[in-house]
Amino acid sequence: MSPVLELLLADSRTPSGGYAHSGGLEAAVGEGLAVSGVPAFVQARLLTVGRVEAAIAALAAEAATLDALLDLDQELAARTPAEPLRRASRQLGLGLLRTACSWWPEDRLLASYHTTSVLTPRPVALGAVARCAGLSALDAARLCLYDDAATVAAAAVKLLPLDAAQASGWLVALAEQIEELAGAAAAGGLPPGAATPLLDRRAMLHDASRRRLFVS
């Protein structure tokens, strides 16, 4: 495994479209969430959506067949009831796959998944790409959790009166918890769903809004 590849996948400058998403923060801010409430918002995502998606990414990193990846597509769809969230994840997954297929054009499993999958959720795509990079299930889970937290932190700087150093400090404070959650996700197999009705409701309202900065 090359450490550079892990860094590249964690880099927001990798062209996968993540900059256009806020992880539901924009809708939460629209309902009154202040700067002081963002760290708890990030942590709540990690313990619910993040935990489930990290486990799916870990399983995808170990998947050796197209059928296994497509089964994970369905498993995650069953755990994501809000269509706007499925759509946002699909866009991110496609963006990541499009980039990764240019990096590893000879990888047949990645190419088959890219052309066959209808859902292409980001966690499954991330795990499939992590396998190509030689990353472990633990690496994939960690990347998935970090990306979730970093997406919200980056969006917060654009949505709230906030110093970017403070936003990055939230990630430092969550580093140990992300590592613990990644280890559990990589070892725990397929998780049950984590109900997030408030996130789902906000996603539906945000999707219908014409005055939004982020896709999700």
Image: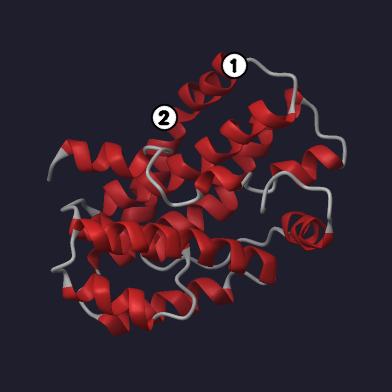
Looking at the image, can residue 144 be seen?
yes
In the rendering, at what x and y percent does residue 178 appear?
43, 37
Q: Residues within 10 Å of mark 1 (few under 14, many from 20)?
A: few
Residue 50 or residue 119, whichever sits in front: 119
Q: Which residue is mark 1?
A: 166
The residue shown at (42%, 49%) is 144
Furthest-front residue in this view: 102
Q: Is residue 99 left or right of residue 40?
A: left
Q: Which residue is mark 2?
A: 176
Labels 2, 1: front one? 1
Amino acid beneath label 2: Glu
Q: Is residue 76 left or right of residue 36?
A: left
Residue 19 or residue 165, whichever sits in front: 19
Q: Which mark is residue 140?
A: none
In the rendering, at what x and y percent does residue 118 appear?
47, 81
Indicate whether 164 appears above or below 131: above
